[in-house]
Amino acid sequence: MLPRMSPTVLDLLAMKNSAVVFACPPETTVAEACRTLRDRRVGCLVVARAGEVQGIFSEGDVVASVVAEGRDPATVTVVEVMSREVATVTLEASSQHTEALLRGHRLRYLPVVGPRGLLGLVSLGDIARYYAARERDAASSSSAAPS
């Protein structure tokens, strides 16, 4: 039996079964971006222009850079408070490499990019769900095997 290769980011996105990535342009106001976070029930927006990732705007950015500073979310733009240094991965990156990036940089989300720009978003939760599903599948296939 051949050893199973490490799953890739492509495998994680396929299991996630969602190609939707919520993004906004840099000039979006924090108030508009927060409405999108609420309405879409997501924790972050990728800040992009023409498919190129420029940053990530998250709930934490709102707390630390808007609310705690007493700034007006109706006038502050996402580009003023977003996280600018964003690590990215490709579809071919291994889940171990992706997890190491997320944990090593204390990130919650990691954009997936390719030759045509933004392709998806992965998190530690996505990695955990992938491995949990794989364990369930292995357990159910071994219990279904004849003795």
Image: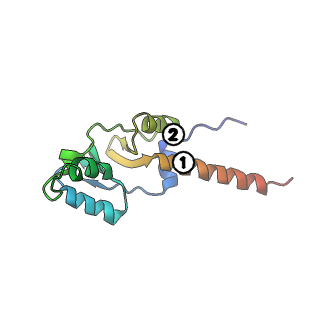
Which callout, 1 or 2, points at the residue further toward the start of the chain? Answer: 2
Along the line of sight, which residue is nearer the eye, 31 or 11? 31
Along the line of sight, which residue is nearer the eye, 80 or 138? 80
Q: Residue furthest left?
A: 75
- The residue where tag 2 is placed is 95
Amino acid type, callout 1: Ala
User: Which quarter of the figure has residue 1?
Assistant: top right
As drawn, the label of residue 128 is 1
Q: Compared to 17, does 131 lie above or below?
A: above
Element class at badge 2: helix
As drawn, the label of residue 17 is none
Residue 30 location in percent, x, y? 21, 55
- Which residue is pictured at 60% across the width and 37% down the height? 5
Q: Compared to 50, does 6 lie above or below?
A: above
* Crowding at mark 2 (Cα within 10 Å: few <14, some 14-19, many 20+): many
Along the line of sight, which residue is nearer the eye, 74 or 110? 74
